[in-house]
Every structure is written in structure tokens, then in C-alpha cells.
Image (cartoon, helix red, strand yellow):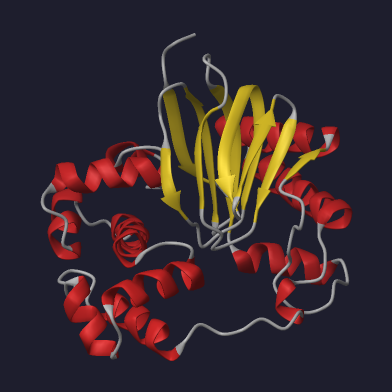
Amino acid sequence: MSREVAHYRRHPAEPGVDLLSARYVTHRYTRHAHATYTVGLIEYGVEEFEHAGSTLRAGAGQVALLNPDVVHTGHAGVPEGWRYRVLYPAVDVVAQIAAELGAPGGTPYFPVTVVDDPEAARLIRAVHRSAENGDALASSSTLHRALAGLLRRHAARPPGLVARGAPPRAVRAARDILHERVPDPPTLDDLAGMVGTGRFALLRAFRAAYGLPPHAYLTNLRVQRARTLLDSGARPADVAADLGFTDQAHLTRHFKRIVGVPPGAYLLGRPT
């Protein structure tokens, strides 16, 4: 079982939900974050990943629950790698289900990252299999049951209800500049000068605020925007040029390290 394989698809009936089924051995996810939740069932082997300053391991039968915008990595925790099925539900999808369950306002939050939950594991597998078989109704119904069960058993009050310092003004300004200048970002020296701080101070403060240094944050942002452009029908070569990648190969390399599949495979999962 040394061959790596990955299939990325949109949910057939639920806008805002993507599905990934994959088996990895040597593939390594770079440090990145998703705008969605990540709900992953490990079916075989072990995935090891850095998360919130710790190294965690998820083994066969366990479910990994990652909140939106949390920086993490991912790689094999054993020589034989790992196989898993992942749900990527958008924040509004999960928030709507939480509201239907009577949860308090705010973005739902999972405080424990790796859980043992056989019922959730069964339902996550069923979501994928129904989607693969073209049964949109069954897959949609099972998806709601899976997310509702996870929320009931594992969600907590959003951490936003706990006082937390906002990023320094210079760091927020640097982030805004990166969002405005994705195709043609300034150098680190220029970025620091634009926000009125030193480059090393900016590096430290930016990483403390957003979990990534500016260059890695920009790469993650570029890949997120690449997905939006690909979803709209843009060609990978045009996406690479529009977002400031050196060429399509440059886009492909970073896209796979964050999404888990190259742009071509990602496009295969898009509804036509």
C-alpha cells in the first residue's frame, strides 16, 4: 500500500461543503489554515500534525476536529502513512446547524482536536460513500446528522467570549496590505516601512497574531483565492498569473501542499 491517491469533490447537494478522501505516505501539508472547519476520519494508519503549539496524532477510527483559521500541518505518523476521509463544512453551514440545536450565538468551537467517536466516524464514512454513489439526498441527510452529533457531543462556547487582545495596529495594517496586494506584494523591508515598524519586530508580531509569518500567510491567501477563481471557471495558468505565482507549476506545488491535491484534480471535483 505505497501508492498515494487523493480525490477532492464538492458535496453534491450542500453548497459550502467539500469532501476529500486520500491515502498519503510521503505527502506533507505545509503550515496553513482553512476558512472552513476540518472534520477528518482516520481510516488507516496515523496522521501527525502540528496544531496550536503541540504535535498531535490521530489514529485509525479517531476523528480530528479543527476550527476555522487555525494554522496546522499534516504528515504521516507511521511509515505506512494514513488514509482518511475529510469534510470541510463552511462556517455558516455549521453555525446554522448549531442554531437549529439551540446553541448560543457565535461561531461554534471544538476545544478538543482529536476525539474517539464511533458514531461520528460511521456517519462521516456514510457521507462520503453516499456522495460517491451519487445519492445526494442520503449524503445531505447524513451530513447534517454527523455535524449535529459532533456539535452536541464536542462543541463548547466560542473562545471569542473570552477576552483576547487584538493584533497590534501595525500588524493589522500589514495584513490589510497583503490582502490588497496579493499579485504584487511589497518586500518585507517595504512592508515594515509602510506600517512604521522594524522588519524583525513585524515578523515576530505577525506570526504571534496570525500563526504564520507574512510570506507564508500570503501563500495561504493566494491558494484560498486560487480556489475561488478555479471555482468560477478560470484556467490554472491564468490563476497563477493573476495571483503572482511564478508559473503554473509554482501554483501547483503550493496548492497541493495546502489543499492536498493539485489544481487539475481539484477541478475534477467541481460540479459541471
Frontmost residue, 202 versus 265: 202
In this rendering, position of residue 53 left or right of residue 116: left
Residue 134 in sight: no
Residue 206 on image: x %, y %: 41, 73
Q: How many marks?
A: 0
Q: Farthest residue in the top direction? A: 1
Q: Is residue 159 above or below residue 260?
A: below
Residue plotted at (29% across, 55% down): 230
Q: Is residue 157 left or right of residue 235?
A: right
Quadrant for residue 3, please give it. top left
- 167 displayed left or right of 138: left
Residue at 56% in and 85% down: 166
The image shows residue 198, relative to residue 43, as above or below, that is below
- x then y, percent, for residue 148: 81, 54
Residue 210: x %, y % from top left:
48, 69
Query: x%, y% of residue 155?
Result: 81, 59
Q: Closer to the camera, 225 or 18?
A: 225
Is residue 162 visible in the rendered structure shown here?
A: yes
Q: Residue at x 68, y 48 (%)?
A: 65
Image quarter of residue 205: bottom left
